[in-house]
Amino acid sequence: MNSPTPNHPETSAFRVGLTGDFYKDGEPVYPDFDLEPLQREPGIALANFDEHRDEIAPEQLAGLNGVVVLSPSVTRHSLSQSGELLAISRFGVGYDSVDVAACTENDVALCIATGAVDRPVAEAAVGWMFALSYRMQAKDRLFRDARWDQRGSIMGSGLHGKTVGIIGFGGIGRAVLQMLSGFGMNPPLVYDLVLDPDTITKLGGEPVTLPDLMKRSDFVTVHCPFNEQTADLISAPELELMKPEAFVLNTARGGIINEDALFEALSAERIAGAALDCFVDEPVTEPHRFAQLENVILSSHNIAWTRELFRDIGAMASQNLIDLANGERPKSVINPEVFDRPTFQKKWESVRSSNS
């Protein structure tokens, strides 16, 4: 990631900003985010925010036509002075930190990096399934403590003949299904709030209710977005349905699994274990209560972070804005209805005219 030179972009250019958390002390935090596509695109002027704020301030968006957003939230207040802004391009696929309705009302398209995270997140989830079922952490600790003679006390279990339950059957959930197809597992169970049963069946899953999935699965892996429908989707009643030898994994968003209920279930060993990449309150800057437990694998919402992931996310986040600058509609827009608004079209046409 080459640092763009902070500047006051020419008025004739399509002006793109990067949120302040892409840099620390003037150096790129994530060098694998390749800015070359934006830097070499004729007519685009690039600059990074002077500082990082947890919530983007209105003045940080002043004069910009697009912004690539890493972690800051985008609120109604953030957009209150966004007269020239055409698009927010999220560096990722989650957008629960962005007020989508406010974007539409202020004629701002919200774009994400659709598909860029599918394989890395799916690989991480499958890797965690092996780590949990083979009890890799416990075996590692046994060796480190020089307790070789106790190795027979820690037995794992293979994936063959087991059942995975996939909650959320978008790109990541489907990639999980494909990756597990060669391990001799039972047909995967799928619960999705949007897809119809016929579509799930055609894609290779068995559509089931949530209670049925919780009862029958040896692994429950969560890949749905966080919203009003999915908040506390898995709580005490759902966890009580699980087999005592089953595991739950969450690589989606904190809050989909009720943390109090999960902590209680794990502490009482009513389920075998869990792997958690996301939490209700992030960032986690003090020791978390889940870290007290031996039957949990934890990561800092970065389990799927790889060089390839950041390369691909950056490429798509950049392409969204390059498309807009060139008068093309981006492929990964969350609020496509914004393109039907005359006020958005007028603003877009103004930018295209000045950039031609």
Image (cartoon, rainbow, N blue to C red):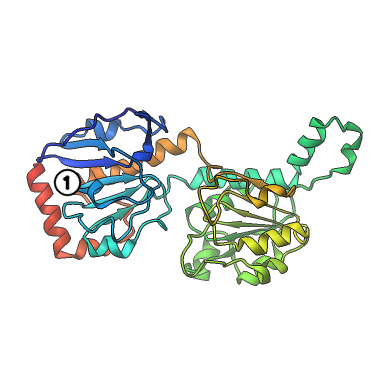
Q: Quick check: 74 left or right of 256?
A: left
Q: Quick check: 163 left or right of 110?
A: right
Q: Where does label 1 land, which residue?
A: 63
Q: Quick check: 205 left or right of 2?
A: right
Tell which residue pokes out farthest to the front in this image.
286
Residue 152 location, x and y as percent? 89, 40
Q: Residue at x 76, y 44 (%)?
A: 135
Q: Quick check: 262 left or right of 193?
A: right
Q: Amino acid at mark 1?
A: Gly
Residue 256 location, x and y as percent? 55, 62
Of 308 and 33, the residue lying toward us: 33
Q: Quadrant of the N terminus?
A: top left
User: Mark 1: which secondary structure?
Assistant: loop
Q: Is residue 313 above or below residue 56?
A: above
Q: Residue at x 67, y 69 (%)?
A: 236
Residue 131 visible here: yes
Q: Quadrant of the C terminus?
A: top left
